[in-house]
């Protein structure tokens, strides 16, 4: 499948990776229904994207609003050909002794349940398309290797990954023309990453040196999704940690702790 002439929903399109995915899809000839909880961010995205985009303020943690949303997209564009699940929230650096039940619920509700709800809402429409459709789910490097101070965030993103893997298997039986791609990005230079680096005391130039640009990440996300790949690891650091994990899981854990833990737990 090629993006040109297709209609895609992109969550988290108000900033960061989501904005870049939306802009890149438009650049490749697609029409985008851009979704975010941040109305101002969506306006900024639309100002850059031009005419082939509509903006929709939506909280993916609101199950009722999510269930009703596909009809909004169909009313606006006539059809939907794919869904890019990118919206998510980060966890402030905190140990498991400090994280509150409320924060745990919010992380799991937005990152995991919101992704599941959006996917379930759009799947019937994608399955009904004669030429199939695409679903992309965004996991994280934290799902490959533990990151100090982000245990619950990592759990939420690991849940997304395994949901995506299972979804891909389900679709082989339900509708082979619809594919699900789970993307596991490493460090992408977004406002969230910048904020996390600053909160841990990591010098911004150092953190940015190891990060991939959102635009480059967006291009790769779109490419692997259009190809219908079941999963893809994006970013040099993610590939390094995956390789280390295959050689020795304790080694990967140790490297992660030495690289990040010294900043995360410094006080």
Image: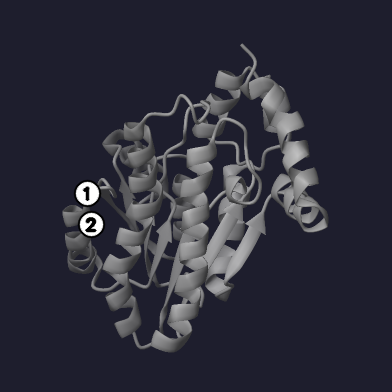
- Side of 33 where 65 appears, left or right: left
Q: Is residue 134 above or below residue 128?
A: above
**Residue 248 % position (x, y):** 81, 52
Residue 265 against residue 7 in the figure, above or below:
above
Q: Is residue 171 above or below residue 255?
A: below
> Which residue appears at 69% of the width and 49% of the height?
238
Q: Is there any visible trace of residue 232 in the rendered image?
A: yes
Residue at x-position 42% and y-position 44%: 88
Residue under label 1: 62
Q: How many marks?
A: 2
Q: Could you tell whether 224 is left or right of 107 in the image?
A: right
Mark 1 residue element? loop
The image shows residue 205, relative to residue 161, as above or below, that is: above
User: Do the numbered discs 1 and 2 sit on residues whose CB atoms are within 8 Å?
Assistant: yes
Q: Residues within 10 Å of mark 1 (few under 14, many from 20)?
A: some
Q: Is residue 178 visible?
A: no
Residue 189 lies, in percent from the top left, at 60, 36
Tell me: 120 left or right of 241: left
- Disc 2 crowd rating (10 Å Cα; few below 14, some 14-19, many 20+) is some
| Residue found at x 71% / y 22% | 262
Q: Position of residue 104 (x, y in %)?
A: 38, 38
- Residue that sits furthest to the front in the current view: 97
Relative depth, front residue between 29 and 167 = 167
Position of residue 27 measured from the top left corner of the image (x, y, whole percent): 49, 58
Q: CA distance from mark 1 to mark 2?
A: 6 Å
Q: Nearest the camera: 208 or 76?
A: 208
| Label 2: which secondary element | helix
What residue is shown at x 37% (from left), y 50% (from top)?
Answer: 50
Q: Is residue 164 left or right of residue 230?
A: left
**Circle 2 sits on which residue?**
66
Quarter of the rendering occupied by the C terminus: top right
């Amino acid at each position: 499948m090629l993006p040109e002439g297709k209609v895609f929903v992109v969550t988290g399109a108000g900033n960061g990776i989501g904005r870049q995915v939306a802009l890149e899809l438009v650049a490749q000839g697609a029409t985008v229904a851009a979704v975010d909880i941040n109305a101002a961010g969506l306006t900024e995205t639309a100002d850059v994207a031009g005419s082939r985009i509509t903006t929709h303020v939506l909280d993916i943690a609101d199950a009722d609003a999510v269930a009703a949303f596909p009809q909004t997209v169909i009313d606006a564009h006539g059809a939907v050909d794919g869904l890019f699940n990118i919206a998510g929230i980060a966890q402030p650096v905190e140990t498991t002794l400090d994280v509150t039940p409320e924060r745990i619920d919010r992380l799991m509700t937005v990152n995991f349940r919101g992704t599941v709800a959006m996917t379930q809402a759009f799947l019937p429409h994608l399955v009904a398309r004669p030429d199939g459709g695409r679903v992309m789910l965004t996991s994280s490097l934290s799902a490959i290797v533990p990151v100090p101070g982000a245990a619950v965030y990592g759990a939420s993103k690991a849940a997304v990954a395994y949901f995506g893997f299972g979804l891909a298997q389900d679709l082989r039986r339900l509708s082979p023309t619809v594919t699900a791609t789970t993307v596991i990005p490493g460090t992408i230079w977004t406002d969230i990453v910048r904020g996390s680096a600053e909160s841990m005391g990591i010098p911004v130039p150092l953190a940015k040196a190891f990060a991939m640009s959102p635009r480059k990440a967006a291009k790769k996300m779109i490419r692997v999704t259009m190809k219908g790949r079941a999963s893809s690891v994006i970013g040099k650091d993610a590939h390094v940690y995956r390789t280390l994990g295959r050689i020795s899981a304790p080694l990967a854990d140790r490297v992660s702790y030495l690289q990040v833990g010294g900043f995360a737990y410094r006080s």
